[in-house]
């Protein structure tokens, strides 16, 4: 056998020997691990090594591919409310230590560990003892040194674990599919962690950590949270009283859509982001510095610089996307600077820079410098937000130049800039606003044909306004979107000053004339000025003439406004076309139902004097007053409307209405004398009644309350008399006659309204009004063939009635005497009367015959006084269901 073959045989036998030895060891290990001796020795060693903190059900021993002690169903003893359970714990010893007769661990592998860490609530007594951070760190360092001596180079691996951190029964962190590797290298910890955190998604952390007596040092740290990452981090955690963090990251990438989605899942964080639907884009920071108390992120100091790219902001506050295509960001010293940014919204694009400054974790100052172009959609949206109609917006495109805005949290705003309108004027504005003052130092409008300077000072106790120059029709047409401005112009040199605490110090001078422009008043409708001429002198402003349109009403005004010690005294004549009270009230008070915005706290203007109004008609609901002359008087408690002249359906209505903030009061004294009744009834009841004759009427009515309650709380009194007429249509009276025609006594003896009508001598009604109910004290219809008297109530809101009526038909006496001779003896000259009760809806009442005993002395006496004859109450024969 040659040398080569001999070595081959040796190698084969050596391999066989090793395999047999390994197989023997495996069999021996399998046999040995099932012995009581192995289980007992292993349990003693584990208890000693882990100081009785580790409990398991069974131990296994493997020798291939490496010697390994496997503990099954492991649990770790931890304080109450916490929990650590491990499906299996693999312990790998160092082979050489085994040869020397000792057991040194080089590696732990934890298979499917379940870790629950429950942060205990704060003690109510506040007396629990806490170890100082330095002492904790000393204990940790001591433990690490001990591990390094006993188990140098120890590696701990976690596979497919889970971790829950809980506080107050709520999960602060819930990590699934947790894998980790912790390597101990000369008291340095090299850590690698991966997992999936609920609401945060995929997380990853790799880095090196080292601890000394007072600090934990971090080096080469890389962290991934979802799609955002931080890399090449180094820093330290100083274990002082507040536990301070200092860290520097060479690069941080923030993916905003992913961050916003994850933050929106937390209820406590969702509130500040409520207006936002989503945020997209990327922020890259290089480098990033963080420092501050570890457990108080709100107080961290941040220094960084980097770039913004493709930022898109979706919000309920702005109906279109806000896009920042690019920009540079710098942060530090409680300031954030945005440089060279390009932003677009609606159909507008702007570029510029901004600076935000914060104190105590709140933004306290902002400064913005921009240039750009605003489109039509942007201007329409802005002007709608300040309650201007889209047509009153400035004409687009609007080129903005040198816009400079300075804001601070004390509500101070400084703004200046120029705007250039294509084929139109240039507008320059310089204004200032604080909590209670608005100052327009200069609003300048210029083009080839117009040149005007406007200034305004608006404060709680002082208002000043000045206008000098001219703005012609072409300038206004080019300035505003509204086509109606094509004829507008304004010119003059005018100044006025109003002292709201000392009215007598107010002054005005100059002249101002304008045509076809709009004034925005503190109401829900603009005042359109057709033409106006104002002149000021000393303490007086003369309204030489004014043609105005407010809502749907055309107004012509002339008069003066004078400043006096007690306030502004108005003496103005106004002519108007027809007015609707409901429309006026809605325009004046509808804004109270809308969200209130914070407004400048200007002292309320004291208005005195009044406006003398004349209009062909004022309507309120179904009531129309014609040929109205009234005085509108101003007072502290509200506005008085005093009617000097006016008619509703030919009835004069002198009286007054007081419009207060919370309610309306009125008191009227309507009257009529000798007027034709039928025309008035046609006007009031739209041909439901047809009664001829001449009538007299007087009443007093008053009420106080909210508009919807005025009828129900109305009170007053009324008297009515009509003479020498015929009733052709009266539904209630017709139903009474129809009912009586059913009786054997009166069948065929009552007048027919449809042919001859019912002639009467007089109709008299007297009554009071209480809580919206007309209480009829006496109602008398003195007919030529029949007499009716009644009393009762009519609800003016529900039209429900409750009346008692006595009916005395004259013709029935002759009929009864001729047919029944004994009746002549019974009546002995008395007049027959029939008692009725009328109830229900006035349009379809229920009528029944009353018993004679149900008629009171008052109603009977009224009948006797009316006809000057004795009255005999009779109960005619009628069907039983018609009798009460």
Image (cartoon, rainbow, N blue to C red):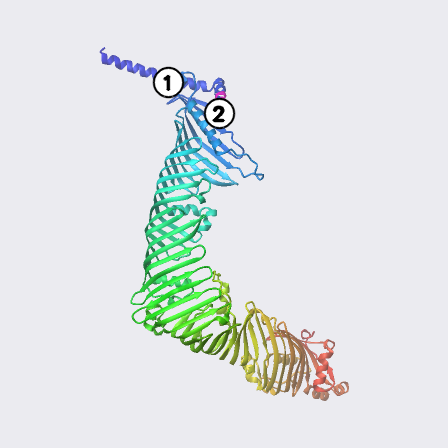
Chief SS of the magenta region? helix
Image quadrant for the N terminus? top left
Say if 594 sits above or below 83 in the image. Answer: below
Where residue 618 appears, x then y in whole percent? 51, 77
Which one is in front, 31 or 141?
Answer: 141
Where residue 66 appears, x then y in whole percent? 38, 22
> Which residue is identified by label 1?
22
The label number, if any, that marks residue 507 in the structure image: none
Which one is in front, 804 or 358?
Answer: 358
Residue at 47% in and 69% down: 498
Label 1: few (<14), some (14–19) or many (≥20) C-alpha neighbours in 10 Å: some
User: Is any atom of residue 796 visible in this view?
Assistant: no
Instruction: Tell me where the magenta segment starts and ends, as one range.
Output: 43-51
Q: Is residue 682 magenta?
A: no
* Mark 2 vs 1, N-terminal side: 1
User: Is any atom of residue 113 visible in this view?
Assistant: yes
Which one is in front, 260 or 489?
Answer: 489
Q: How many marks?
A: 2
Identify the image quadrant of residue 70.
Answer: top left
Identify the image quadrant of residue 390.
Answer: bottom left
> Which residue is identified by label 2?
50
The residues bearing labels 2 and 1 have C-alpha atoms spaced at a distance of 30 Å
Identify the image quadrant of residue 386.
Answer: bottom left
Residue at 56% in and 67% down: 662
Which one is in front, 349 or 816?
Answer: 349
SS of the residue under disc 2: loop
Where residue 393 appears, x then y in whole percent? 37, 66
Q: Is residue 44 magenta?
A: yes
Say if 533 sits above or below 429 in the image. Answer: below
Residue at 30% in and 69% down: 447
């Amino acid at each position: 056998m040659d040398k080569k073959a001999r070595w081959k045989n040796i190698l084969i036998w050596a391999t066989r020997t090793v395999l047999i030895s390994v197989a023997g060891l495996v069999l021996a290990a399998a046999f040995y691990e099932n012995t009581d001796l192995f289980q007992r020795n292993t349990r003693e060693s584990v208890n000693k090594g882990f100081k009785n903190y580790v409990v398991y059900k069974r131990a296994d021993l493997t020798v291939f591919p490496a010697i390994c002690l496997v503990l099954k169903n492991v649990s770790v003893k931890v304080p109450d409310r916490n929990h650590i359970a491990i499906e299996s714990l693999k312990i790998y010893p160092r082979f050489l230590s085994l040869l020397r007769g000792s057991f040194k661990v080089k590696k732990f592998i934890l298979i499917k560990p379940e870790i629950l860490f429950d942060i205990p609530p704060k003690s109510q007594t506040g007396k629990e003892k806490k170890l100082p951070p330095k002492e904790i760190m000393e204990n940790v360092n001591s433990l690490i040194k001990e591990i390094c001596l006993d188990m140098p180079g120890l590696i701990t691996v976690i596979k497919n674990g889970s971790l829950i951190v809980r506080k107050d029964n709520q999960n602060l962190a819930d990590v699934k599919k947790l894998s980790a590797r912790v390597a101990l290298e000369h008291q340095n910890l090299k850590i690698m962690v991966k997992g999936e955190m609920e609401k945060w998604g995929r997380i990853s952390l790799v880095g090196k950590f080292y601890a000394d007596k007072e600090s934990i040092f971090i080096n080469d740290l890389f962290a991934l949270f979802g799609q955002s990452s931080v890399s090449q981090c180094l820093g330290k955690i100083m274990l002082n009283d507040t536990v301070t963090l200092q860290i520097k990251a060479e690069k941080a990438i923030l993916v905003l859509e992913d961050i916003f989605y994850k933050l929106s899942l937390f209820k406590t964080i969702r509130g500040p982001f409520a207006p936002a639907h989503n945020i997209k884009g990327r922020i890259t920071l290089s480098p990033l510095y963080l420092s501050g108390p570890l457990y108080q992120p709100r107080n961290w100091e941040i220094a960084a610089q980097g770039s913004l790219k493709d930022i898109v902001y979706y919000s309920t506050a702005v109906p279109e996307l806000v896009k920042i295509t690019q920009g540079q960001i710098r942060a530090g010293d409680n300031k954030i600077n945005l440089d060279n940014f390009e932003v677009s919204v609606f159909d507008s694009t702007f570029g510029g820079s901004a600076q935000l400054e914060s104190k105590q974790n709140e933004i306290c100052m902002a400064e913005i410098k921009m240039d750009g172009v605003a489109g039509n959609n942007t201007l329409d949206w802005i002007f709608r937000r300040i309650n201007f109609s889209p047509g009153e917006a400035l004409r687009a495109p609007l080129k903005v130049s040198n816009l400079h805005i300075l804001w601070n949290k004390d509500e101070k705003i400084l703004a200046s800039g120029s705007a250039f309108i294509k084929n139109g004027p240039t507008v320059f504005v310089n204004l200032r606003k604080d909590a209670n003052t608005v100052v327009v130092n200069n609003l300048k409008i210029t083009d080839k044909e117009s040149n005007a300077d406007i200034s305004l000072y608006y404060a709680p106790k002082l208002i000043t306004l000045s206008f000098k120059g001219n703005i012609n029709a072409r300038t206004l047409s080019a300035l505003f979107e509204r086509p109606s401005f094509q004829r507008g112009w304004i010119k003059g040199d005018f100044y006025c000053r109003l002292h709201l605490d000392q009215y007598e110090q107010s002054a005005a001078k100059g002249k101002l004339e304008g045509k076809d422009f709009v004034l925005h008043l503190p109401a829900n409708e603009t005042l359109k000025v057709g033409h106006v001429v104002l002149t000021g002198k000393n303490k007086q402003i003369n309204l030489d003439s004014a043609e105005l349109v407010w809502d749907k009403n055309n107004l012509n005004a002339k008069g003066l406004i004078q400043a006096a010690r007690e306030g502004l005294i108005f003496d103005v004549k106004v002519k108007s076309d027809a007015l609707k009270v409901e429309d006026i009230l809605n325009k004046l008070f509808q804004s109270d139902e809308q969200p209130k915005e914070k407004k400048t706290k200007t002292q309320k203007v004291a208005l005195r004097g009044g406006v003398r109004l004349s209009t062909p008609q004022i309507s309120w609901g179904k009531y129309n007053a014609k040929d109205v002359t009234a005085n509108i008087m101003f007072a502290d408690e509200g506005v008085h409307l005093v009617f000097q002249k006016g008619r509703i359906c030919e009835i004069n209505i002198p009286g007054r209405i007081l419009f207060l903030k919370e309610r309306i009061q009125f008191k009227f004294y309507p009257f009529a004398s000798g007027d034709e009744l039928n025309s008035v009834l046609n006007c009031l009841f739209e041909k439901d009644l047809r009664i001829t004759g001449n009538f007299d009427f007087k009443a007093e009515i008053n009420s106080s309350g909210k508009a919807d309650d005025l009828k129900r709380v109305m009170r007053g009194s009324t008297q009515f008399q009509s003479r020498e007429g015929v009733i052709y249509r009266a539904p209630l009276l017709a139903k009474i006659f129809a009912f009586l025609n059913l009786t054997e006594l009166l069948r065929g003896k009552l007048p027919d309204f449809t042919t001859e009508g019912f002639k009467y001598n007089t109709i008299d009604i007297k009554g009071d009004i209480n809580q919206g109910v007309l209480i009829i004290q006496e109602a008398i219809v003195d007919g030529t063939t029949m007499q009716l008297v009644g009393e009762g109530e009519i609800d003016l809101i529900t039209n429900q009635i409750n009346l008692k009526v006595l009916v005395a038909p004259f013709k029935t006496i002759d009929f009864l005497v001729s047919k029944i001779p004994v009746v002549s003896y019974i009546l002995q000259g008395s007049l027959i009367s029939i008692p009725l009760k009328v109830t229900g809806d006035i349009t379809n009442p229920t009528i029944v015959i009353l018993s004679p005993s149900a008629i009171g002395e008052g109603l009977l006496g009224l009948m006797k006084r009316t006809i000057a004859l004795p009255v005999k109450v009779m109960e005619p024969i009628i069907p039983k269901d018609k009798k009460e």
